[in-house]
Amino acid sequence: MDDLLLSFKFYSRPDQLKLVRAKVTEAVTSCGCIGETIQDFVIAVDEACQNIIRHAYQGQPDGEIILEIFKKNDDIVVLLKDFAHTVDPELIKPRDLDDLRPGGLGTHFMQEVMDEVTFMPPPQEGGNLLKMKKRIT
Amino acid sequence: MEYEVRKVDEASVVMLQGDIDLESSPQSRKVLLECIEKGSPVLVDMSGVSYIDSSGIASLVEALQKSRQGKCYFALVAVSEGALRVINLARLDKVFLIHGTLEDGLKEAVTS
């Protein structure tokens, strides 16, 4: 059975990310995560939110983002939904790390720290839905 | 994020503190690039960095590239555990010069 740890709506502004990181820390700590595992969820959600702010809403500051975190058996599942235009996941795929240049690392970080990162089919009402999952035992 | 720039011998020591994220990374980028433009060695003290994301890492990469173009010494010193983990995730731990302490960084900067 899914256990909802957090449901949080916020706006697509960089100044919201500190609060988002605090909410994620609180949620995953409440179900027993410690140390690097907490940091993993913080990194993954922060980078995913950056992608939404920069690529989906393209800097528009009043876009809505809904973050939900569930515990499902031994997994923690993160869902991030936005209502921007649908973004082609190919445009935010990780870059070659040997190519030294600023930027393009966010999706790589998400894939490194999570067990699964899935860009779900766009919801009927539009926008984007991202699902990330990590086993915590 | 808070920052402090001070001159130690011939080097500029940039102390970054707090969270370097999408909101604050434009400021870290600006401070680092301004120091590098002066041409003296630049040491970035990251002992007080509590969090750094990909945009913060991008500001360090841009500073590194600028330092290489200007043949200016650029190194990270006393990197916090959390920040070092993110640098490792980006596979940049062998790309940046990283010293354990500011003193080590200063010695290296003088002899480089």
Image: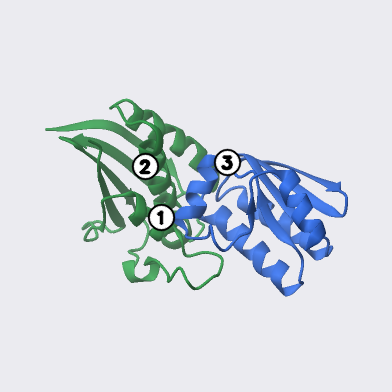
Q: What chain is the green one?
A: A
- Asked which secondary structure carries label 3, the reply is loop
- Same chain under badges 2 and 1? The reply is yes
B54 or A131: nearer the viewer:
B54
Of the residues shown, which amino acid type is indicated by label 3?
Ser
Question: Who's the residue at 43% across and 52% down the image?
Answer: A47
Looking at the image, is A92 positioned above or below residue A125? below
In the rendered image, the residue lying farthest to the right is B9
Q: On the image, numbered disc 2 is attached to which residue?
A: A41
Dot 2 falls on which chain?
A
Dot 3 falls on which chain?
B
- Asked which secondary structure carries label 1, the reply is helix
Looking at the image, is A111 positioned above or below residue A23? below
| Quadrant where the N terminus of chain A is found in the figure | top left
Q: Circles 3 and 2: CB distance less than 8 Å? A: no
- Is A115 positioned to the left or the right of A35 in the image? left
> Which label lies toward us, 3 or 2?
3
Q: On the image, numbered disc 1 is attached to which residue?
A: A109
Question: Who's the residue at 37% across and 58% down the image?
Answer: A84
Where residue B78 appears, x then y in whole percent? Answer: 64, 43
